[in-house]
Amino acid sequence: MADSVVPHFHNDPGVPKIEIGAHEFKCTGALPPNDHPHVYLDMGDANEIVCPYCSTLYSYNPALAPNQARPAECAYTGKAA
């Protein structure tokens, strides 16, 4: 059983870079129904990763909680924005 839920992030606003508080996460691209396949990304020891589907640059920010993003609206909650 998993100890935590993998945070999800999206780039509906179309920003070039999203800061997040997690090294492991899922990118949904845009909000449903315009999302791409939800891809699990793991930065490993790095602090940045590019989504292979939507080309969003995700950058780790240790000041953010694992489910937080900057811009804040890019944290996917499963609810319509």
Image (cartoon, rainbow, N blue to C red):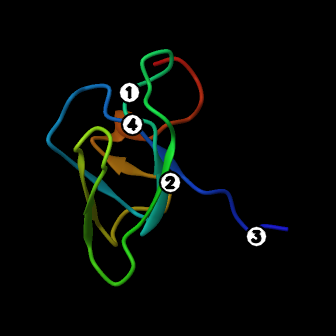
Q: Secondary structure at mark 3?
A: loop
What's under tag 4, amino acid-wise? His
CB-based contact (under 8 Å), mark 4 and mark 1:
yes
Label located before the other in sequence (3 or 4): 3
Pick the front one: 38 or 4: 38
> Closer to the N terminus: mark 2 or mark 1?
1
> If the image is split into quadrants, where does the C terminus sit?
top left
Front of the two marks 2 and 1: 1
Pointer 3 residue = 3
Q: Position of residue 66 (x, y in %)?
A: 49, 62
Residue tagged by mark 4? 10
Check disc 2 and report the residue beneath it: 67
Asked which secondary structure carries label 1, the reply is loop
Q: Amino acid at mark 2?
A: Asn
Q: Residue tagged by mark 1?
A: 30
The tag earlier along the polypeptide, 2 or 4, is 4
